Image: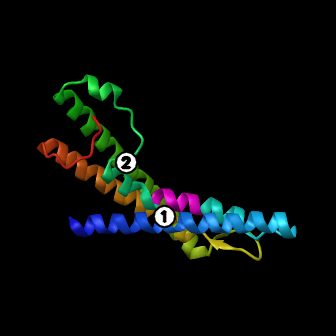
């Protein structure tokens, strides 16, 4: 289990580095426009794909650490059995949804690899298969985390982060 958490932490850290890098690139683009009348090429494409990558690199870690956005108003009104039932249902539905995203994104990842699909025009052409790979991997890991939390809740373990 420690290796699994280390993988999620590493992906989260990678996304944090990507956030810092895209901040620097956007700052350089704005400075180039303001001071030299010359923007950097490909910044809209880089930003668009970076946001997608950041979300999927951090999704499972955010779920694991209980840092996702959640309103617990109704959960706090429920008894333990009701709260646990809602949380298990949430985890099961979340796992199914994430598996569906991975399942339906996988063929697109393979297709974009096979045909060499890219986004953007010269001089910045970004291959799309790595982005699809991150979507597939991130959604699959998030499905695993939802399943892990569902099992923990069903078995009555206290290793699920809930703000209730």
Its colouring scheme is rainbow
Name the residue tied to disc 2. Answer: 67
- N-terminal label among 2 and 1: 1
Q: Is residue 90 above or below residue 10?
A: above
What x and y, as percent, mark residue 13? 42, 66
Residue at 51%, 60% (x, y): give it: 54
Q: Quadrant of the C terminus?
A: top left
Label 1 secondary element: helix
Q: Is residue 103 above or below residue 110?
A: above
Q: Is residue 141 left or right of residue 18?
A: left
Relative to the observer, which residue lies in front, 20 or 18? 20
- Main secondary structure type of the part rendered in magenta: helix
What x and y, as percent, mark residue 126? 65, 72
Relative to the observer, which residue lies in front, 108 or 28? 28
Q: Is residue 77 above or below residue 13?
A: above
Crowding around mark 1 (Cα neighbors within 10 Å: few <14, some 14 to 19, many 20+) is some
Relative to the observer, which residue lies in front, 15 or 147? 15
Residue at the front extreme of this rendering? 35
Crowding around mark 2 (Cα neighbors within 10 Å: few <14, some 14 to 19, many 20+) is few
Name the residue tied to disc 1. Answer: 16
What x and y, as percent, mark residue 38? 84, 70
Q: Is residue 123 magenta?
A: no
Label 2 secondary element: loop
Residue at 31%, 53% (x, y): give it: 64
Q: Is residue 127 left or right of residue 78?
A: right
Residue at the top extreme of this rendering? 77
Q: CA distance from mark 2 to mark 1?
A: 15 Å
- Residues shaded magenta: 50-56
Q: Which mark is residue 143?
A: none
What x and y, as percent, mark residue 109? 51, 67
Residue at 46%, 69% (x, y): give it: 14
Residue at 60%, 62% (x, y): give it: 49
């Amino acid at each position: 289990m420690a290796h699994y958490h280390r993988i999620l932490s590493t992906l989260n850290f990678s996304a944090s580095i990507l956030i810092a890098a895209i901040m620097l690139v956007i700052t350089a683009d704005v400075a180039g426009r303001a001071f030299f009348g010359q923007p950097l090429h490909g910044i809209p494409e880089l930003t668009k794909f970076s946001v997608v990558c950041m979300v999927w690199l951090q999704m499972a870690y955010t779920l694991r650490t209980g840092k996702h956005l959640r309103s617990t108003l109704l959960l706090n009104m429920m008894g333990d059995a009701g709260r646990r039932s809602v949380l298990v249902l949430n985890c099961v539905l979340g796992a199914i949804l994430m598996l569906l995203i991975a399942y339906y994104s996988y063929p697109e990842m393979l297709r974009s690899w096979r045909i060499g699909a890219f986004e953007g025009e010269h001089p910045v052409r970004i291959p799309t298969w790595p982005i699809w790979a991150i979507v597939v991997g991130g959604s699959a890991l998030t499905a695993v985390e939802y399943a892990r939390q569902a099992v923990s809740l069903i078995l009555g373990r206290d290793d699920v982060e809930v703000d209730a």
